[in-house]
Image: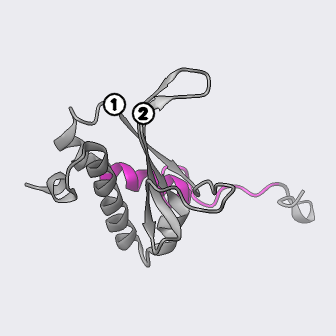
Amino acid sequence: MRRDRHGRGLRGTLYPASLPAAASRAERFDALVLDALEPIEARWRHELTKLDVAVDDVPEVPLDGRAPADGVLHDGAVPLSRLVPAGVDRSGLPTRARIVLYRRPLEARAKDPSELADLVHDVLVEQVAGYLGVEPDVIEGD
């Protein structure tokens, strides 16, 4: 009803789906994460075979209101990402380790798209370094 104003029918899409402008913010962020992950994965492919990378809109807030200790924090407030270690889920099935990037907090801290790309890259480097147990400089080394 909301989009069928004055009996003119539903509105069409503004841009064709083939153009980058038609992608949603979430889709553009996903592409940004893949671009940031590509050089890391190219260098550390064998060590990262049991690691997944995921994107979530916002972090879950525990009932006590504290942020998870394993997240990358900014000013002790909202986590930008989280490294979830491998383990066993509630049904007893094994789970893989994964890095979860939180889209909205990352976007809120970046002033422009290039700063967002740098921030996503830095957070990924830090989390991969934590997963592998090495310094972040080693992940980016030549």
Q: Quadrant of residue 12?
A: bottom right
Highlighted magenta segment, given as a residue range: 10-36
Q: Do the residues under discs 1 and 2 have CB atoms within 8 angstroms?
A: yes
Pick the residue in front: 86 or 41: 86
Q: Which residue lies furthest to the left in this view?
A: 142
Image coords of residue 2 (percent x, y): 86, 61
Q: Mark 2 points at which residue?
A: 86
Which of the two discs, 1 and 2, sits closer to the camera?
2
Image coords of residue 31 (percent x, y): 41, 52
Residue located 65% across and 62% down the image: 65
Q: Which color mode does the image show?
A: one colour
Q: Name the residue under label 1.
A: 50
Q: Which residue lies furthest to the bottom in this view?
A: 111
Q: In which quarter of the image is the C terminus?
A: bottom left
The kind of residue on which mark 1 rests is Lys
Residue located 11% across and 56% down the image: 141
Pick the residue in front: 37 or 129: 129
Instruction: Tell me the element at label 2.
Output: loop
- Membership of 25 in magenta stretch: yes
The kind of residue on which mark 2 rests is Ala
Q: In this view, does 60 lie to the left or right of 98?
A: right
Residue located 28% across and 55% down the image: 125
- Membership of 77 in magenta stretch: no
